[in-house]
Amino acid sequence: MQKELSVIAGPSSPNLAAKIAQDLRAELIPVDVRIFTDSESRIKMGDVKKKNCVIVQSTYPPADRHLLQTLMMIKKCKDDLAADICTVIPYMAYARQDRVFQDGEVISIELIAKLLETAGNKRLITIDIHSSLALSYFRIDVQNISSIPLLANHAANNIKLNRTVVVSPDAGGIERAYEFAKILGSDTIALKKWRDRNSGEIFFDDKLECNIAHRDVVLVDDIISSGGSIVKACQILKKNKADKIYAMCVHALLVEDAAEKIRAAGVQEIISTNSIPSRYAKVDISPIISACLRS
Ligand code: R5P
């Protein structure tokens, strides 16, 4: 028997949850959150007994708070004896700590995977998780959906591009850039980037594999956080005489003044999905999440 579907609007993603509920003609369950003076969260939501629950909560900063609220909502569903618990975490925090880079570090995403499962989460939907290694720590059913076709179609339909080159700021993102470039029918290159693990500083090789002079560039990354990668990538691209530069990403964390720094570096426009709400979130991922839930 088909159970009733309830979309739970996590405190970090109420608008996305509302769109998904509307797409699926599902009941939308609001979550009341209160942040105490000591910074702890208290959540309150309606009864979901015997319902198929879909919790929508992106774990962008404050990441720890949003993660803990996710665990609280899962616990509430479990305590209510929900028929099923599926969590939609469009931006999965801690996925970049997917290995031990330096002795003494903890593989954070492995712990997050265990916590979600232990709390009672049965399945997970995420968008462009940072790496397949991060994904490998989950033992529950996980759907990692690519939003790259949506981003590429947005670029194709909304930006006037000339002799485009799609550029990944690092070798790790080349598959993403290929997927994007295939839709635009353009060339692709990856910059050579490396990081000093002690200082966190990043460096780029300024020699490129192809001539980008007087061509428009779309920089494609999964995450823009401090903006450091995009700013330095811009310097290399400008040095190689790129014309217009656009920065597109899935998850625009854009911490502190990252957006201003990126614009100052010469980027025409920053465009992201709405995995994280912001003024740059111009690409709506709710249709791909709803389609995944439907199937
Ligand atoms: C790194 O591997 C990621 O794909 C992004 O390039 C990185 O997280 C961006 O961070 P930031 O904006 O701080 O340079």
Image (cartoon, helix red, strand yellow):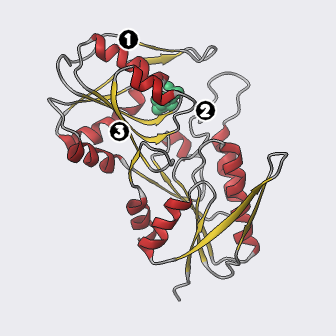
For the residues marked 2 and 3, what is the alpha-carbon distance in whole angstroms?
A: 21 Å
Residue type, label 2: Arg
Q: Residue 99 carries which label?
A: 2
**Mark 2: which secondary structure?**
loop
Taking the image as shown, residue 257 lies to the left or right of residue 282, namely: right
Q: In this view, does 250 lie above or below 190?
A: below
Q: Does label 2 or label 3 sit earlier along the sequence?
A: 2
Residue type, label 3: Arg
**Mark 1: which secondary structure?**
loop
Q: Name the residue under label 3.
A: 176
Circle 3 packing at 10 Å, graded few (<14), some (14-19), many (20+), is many
Q: Does label 1 or label 2 sit earlier along the sequence?
A: 2
Residue sitting farthest toward the right: 38
Q: Quadrant of the C terminus?
A: bottom left
Query: Which of the two discs, 1 and 2, sits closer to the camera?
Result: 1
Report how many numbered discs are placed on residues in the image: 3
Residue 234 in the image, given as x and y percentages of width and height: 36, 19
**Mark 3: which secondary structure?**
helix
